[in-house]
Amino acid sequence: MTEARAYMEMGQKDKVGPALTEAQEIFKAVGDRFHEAYVHVENPHGETWFCDPAYWWFRDVFLEMAREAGCETVNCTEGGILFGPPLRVATIEAFVEGRAYG
């Protein structure tokens, strides 16, 4: 049996949409140019998300840790910015049933 770890949530990131302008205090400071300050990415679920550069860096560090972890890491959030090799993406139900790894 392959050892695996499920990932459930990670910090500040939001779907692009009406909540975008309400999400951060920075919007008050930069006005209509706030989109320029954030990373926008489409995830494997076809959703567009945004995050600030610090969380994008944390994502890269998380992926690096996952490569060195010695186990499979599965993102079970069904959204967000954390995806890419070596992570697998699956529902929590698939993970619990053992269909998301191995």
Image (cartoon, helix red, strand yellow):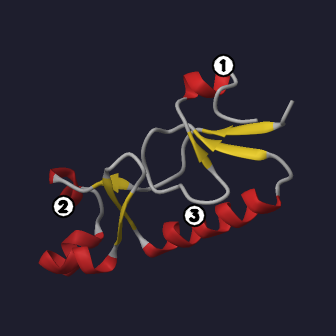
Extreme residue in the top direction: 97
Residue at 42% of width from left, 44% of height from top? 79
* Gap between marks 2 and 1 measured at Cα: 39 Å
> Which is nearer the N-term, disc 3 or disc 2?
2
Give the image location of residue 19, x and y in percent. 20, 51
Give the image location of residue 53, x and y in percent. 45, 75
Element at label 1: loop
Q: Decide which of 73, 19 is in the foreground and name it.
A: 73
In the figure, 95 relative to 39: above or below?
A: above
Element at label 2: helix
For badge 2, the amino acid type reads: Thr
Q: Decide which of 79, 21 is in the foreground and name it.
A: 79
For badge 1, the amino acid type reads: Glu
Q: Which mark is residue 85?
A: none
Taking the image as shown, residue 52 lies to the left or right of residue 74, namely: left
Q: Nearer the viewer, mark 2 or mark 1?
A: 1
Give the image location of residue 26, x and y in percent. 29, 72
In the figure, 30 relative to 100: above or below?
A: below
Q: Label 3 belongs to which residue?
A: 59
Residue at 54% of width from left, 50% of height from top? 10
Element at label 3: helix
In the figure, 67 relative to 71: above or below?
A: below
Q: Are marks 3 and 2 in contact (CB under 8 Å)?
A: no
Taking the image as shown, residue 37 lies to the left or right of residue 100, namely: left
Q: Which mark is residue 21?
A: 2
Q: Which mark is residue 97?
A: 1
Taking the image as shown, residue 39 lies to the left or right of residue 16, namely: right
